[in-house]
Amino acid sequence: MDYKLRKAEPKDVSDILRLVKELAKYEEMEHQVTLTEKELLEDGFGDTPFYHCVIAETQGESSSDDPRVVGFAMYYFTYDPWVGKQLYLEEFYVMDEYRGLGIGSEILRHLSDLAMKTRCTGMMFVVAQNNEPSVQFYKRRGAEDLSQEEGWRLFRFDKDSLVKMATPAEE
Amino acid sequence: MASFILRRAEPKDVSDILRLIKELAKFEEMEEKVILTEKELLEDGFGDHPFYHCLVAEVPKEQSSEEYTVIGFAMYYFTYDPWIGKLLYLEDFFVMQEFRGLGIGSEILKRLSETAVKTRCSSMHFIVAENNTKSIEFYKRRGAADLSSEEGWRLFEIDKADLLKMTSK
């Protein structure tokens, strides 16, 4: 089956949201996706993009078939104060029926190429520790588990805590 | 009571920013790992597309025993959660030892929280070394949750050598 990779365009936001929800469903978290197409559009295709997407599209069985978006990777740039720019892979998903065709590898190769072109020193991403197939997929390509090796733990302040901190009570 | 101000970093601050990055790295016994230069900090932070933002804390000249007045900083950028949208990511956060205990850290965190809320971020993320109990307590006191504990996420990295390997396949 023929497929191609390309940069996402504004018209892709509905497919991006669909795939974000499919991946969330796979993690049994579909109801947690509150992002809307409108936000994806503003945040990804405005003056300052907050994310970038690469899309995998199949050409279809015959020339009359509409191309179908079957996979994507969402990424953005982060900054390591010791070495500079990094590419952060936020989301990476290929629809079940389209796996095993090398699409995932090709997306990762495309991102690696992009990271090199934009002078990034590394690519980072998180993986759920129980997601064995993904952990192996990445380790086969040289990924290191920094949580294990360097003992880093990811923390979060949610909105309530942020609001509390932004307007503290009188001392 | 020491007086200090917090302000957005400017191009002239890159040498202080690099100095503080190295001081924090030294504190983590990793000083030799800082290979970033002032030139890169300048291009990356103050060009057309900033890859990071900085808040700096400054004291009046009389209060500093050294030649410099910039005595603390926070480096942050925006990330994107595909379920909820924009997040503020706190990358580096350091106040020089001699200036601790004056509320500078708390004030920086407050300013960052305001920025996050203003730019409609759903939350602030950051990583902490699991053996850094003082910092963990500082953040937990303010409501931070340890996602690594609660949600089992593990941070991975593919370094340059392996990225290059993949591009040539």
Image (cartoon, coloured by chain):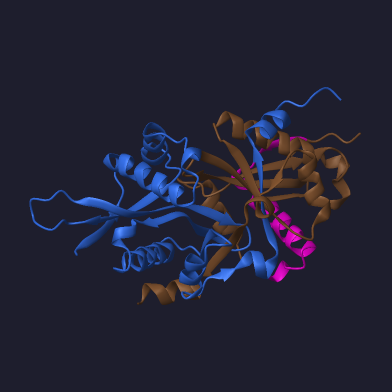
Residue B29 drawn above or below residue B88: below
Residue B145, x across and y down, in percent? 70, 45
Looking at the image, which residue sits at the far right?
B1
The C terminus of chain A is located in which quarter? top right
Left or right for B109, reference B9: right
Q: Is residue B91 visible?
A: no
Residue at the spot x=66%, y=37% of the render? B112
Residue A37, x across and y down, in percent? 37, 35
Which residues are drawn in magenta?
Answer: B5-33
Picture quarter containing residue A60? bottom left
Residue A32 drawn above or below residue A135: above
Camera-side residue: B102 or B69? B102
Residue B9, x across and y down, in percent? 64, 42
Picture quarter containing residue A167? top right
Camera-side residue: B92 or B6? B92
Q: Colour of chain B?
A: brown
Residue at the spot x=88%, y=36% of the render? B2
Instruction: Name the main secondary structure of what is drawn in magenta.
Output: helix
Left or right for B84, reference B3: left
Q: Colour of chain A?
A: blue
